Structure formats: C-alpha cells, structure tokens
Amino acid sequence: MKTTLPYIQFSILPSSKDMAAFEDKLRLYGNANESAQNRSYELLHTLQATFPNRVVFTIVIICQEGEIKTRCNLKDYTIRKDQLLIVVPNTIVESLELLPGSKVLCMAVSDDSYSPTLTQFHSAYERSRFVSPIFANIGEELMAEAIASYSHLWHMLRRFPDRMTDDLVRAYIQVMSGVVAISMAKELERVVSVPLSAADKTLKSFLSNLAEGYTEHRDVAYYAGLACLSPKYFAKSVLKASGRSPLDWIQEYVILEAKTMLRSGAYSVQQVSDALNFPSISHFARYFKNAAGISPKKYQSQ
C-alpha cells in the first residue's frame, strides 16, 4: 500500500529507565503515584512530532487529573478525570493537547500481541460504524480499579521483569479491558449478545482489507474478489451488516485521508491526488467534491 500520512510504528516509541515494558509488546508510560509531570509525556510528544499521523498500534490514554484534547479521524475528543480513550490501530491522529497540571497514564500495545485482548469488545462497533477511538466515561469507582491494575502491572514489570510472562501480562490487560466493558455494558449489550452472522463476518473482513488497500483500490469488485463473492452478493452482505454500501465505506476511508492531508497544510492538492492514486487532479477534485460538497482547494483554504 502506498503510504500517504506518516505511520507511527511501535518500534519508534521512546524508552527510558523510568518506564515499564515487556519485551517489544507493551510499554507503560507514567506511574499512578507520580506527580503530574510523568513519563506519559514522552509518548505523547513522540506523537506530536509528526502530526498528522496514522497510529498502527493501540494506545490507552487515562486521565487522572486535568484535561486532554485530541482530534482523531476528524473528530474532537476531550478526556477528563475518570475518562479514557483507546486509540485503535489505523487511527489518524491530528492533534493532542494536555492542559497544564494534567496527570495522564499511557499504555502502548503492539498491534500483533495484546491489542485483540484490550479491544475484544470493539468488534461490536465494526457492525455499525467506522473504526474509531473508543471513548469511555469510566466513573470514579471503576477508574480506581483500572488504575489499580495498571499500577500493579507497572510495579511487577519494574520489580520482577524476568518473572513476567505473556499469560501474566495478558491477565492484567484483560482486567483493564473488563473495566471498560463494564462501564459500556448498556451500550454494548445490544450488539455483543448477538453472534456474528455471515454478513457481519463479510463486513469485518472487508474493513480489514479496505484499511490496507483504499489508497489503490476503490472498486467494489476488487474487495468482493478478496472475499470470494460476487460483487452483487458482497454489496448486499455489507449493506445488511452495516446499513451502508461498500462504496460508502470506501469513500469514507479515502475522504478521511484526503481531508487530513489537506488540513495539515503539508500537502498540495496535486500531492494528495497522487498519494491516493487518482489518475488526474481533476478526477480527484470531482471525487472529493461529490463526497464533501466542496472542492479540495476550498476545503484546504478554510
């Protein structure tokens, strides 16, 4: 896949003697007992250095005090005390601001290890919405449980690094994931209780393939072929599972990338068109205006 926005890989994250880590799979920035100026800032500053960017691993941002503002996938989020945000893989992060005196805990999880455990309930959202960060208003009591698990894991990794195993680390992450699931129980009850249908599985596979191929492939037939289905049956399945056509999904991915690049000021309209593999700038301009209701040049100048 042709790269457009900078990709932030887990391997480039900062390390320090004060953080807690497990192999190349997990990093904890910030101890719950530290002052506001904690090590979480090291991770956040790394993200800020290349805005806008696309994160390809999972980040959990926990607010203990103060306020954090961020913009992900063209949507603004404000995280306050007893709230958290889980930035799932393939999220576009445009901005991140910590108010003075804020105290933040951050956990970075490599995409191929513990992320599925941490976001096990997120598949429910794939049936009805674009993959996006998970915002949770935990509340004081449940947040205390989440922070206790985080803090205990931090101390265990620091004190007994040679004794920690995959199973032990995964158990701690499951506890934190469970706290989030409990806080969102009512919202998730409608979808989690229903097993994935064939159409749901087709949608999930489609979104995975789309995340890898949207800069080069905008035709439904391509994704139908990957699913070994006819374009007509494939489109019907995606529509049934999500209420949206495959073309709508493809357009959302392409326009999200295009808008983010244009907003950044680092790319010209021609460069965006080239990065997204349009045959010409006029073709890109028509595609963008049909979707956004405004030309890319006017959108960039707003």
Image (cartoon, rainbow, N blue to C red):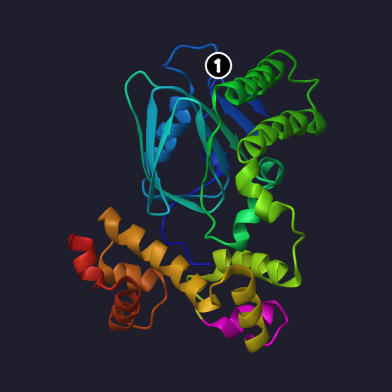
Q: Nearer the viewer, residue 214 or 87?
A: 87
* The C terminus sits in image quarter: bottom left
How far from the left and from the top, in percent, is residue 207? 60, 66
Q: Is residue 3 above or below residue 169?
A: below
Give the residue number, with chain letter if any, for mark 1: 32
Q: Is residue 277 above or below residue 152?
A: below
Helix, strand or loop for disc 1: loop
How far from the left and from the top, in percent, is residue 188? 64, 48
133 is within the stretch colored magenta: no
What span is colored magenta in the figure? 219-231
User: What main secondary structure does the magenta stretch of the protein show?
Assistant: helix
Q: Is residue 135 above or below residue 161?
A: below
Q: Nearer the viewer, residue 109 or 119?
A: 119
How far from the left and from the top, in percent, is residue 105? 52, 25
Mark 1 Cα shell of 10 Å, populated few (<14), some (14-19), many (≥20): some
Q: Does residue 266 appear anywhere in the picture?
A: no
Instruction: Choose top left, top right, bottom left or bottom right for residue 209.
Output: bottom right
Q: Along the horizontal axis of the image, is 29 left or right of 96?
A: right
Residue drawn at point x = 81 percent, y = 20 percent: 163
How far from the left and from the top, in percent, is residue 243? 56, 71
226 is within the stretch colored magenta: yes
Identify residue type, mark 1. Ala
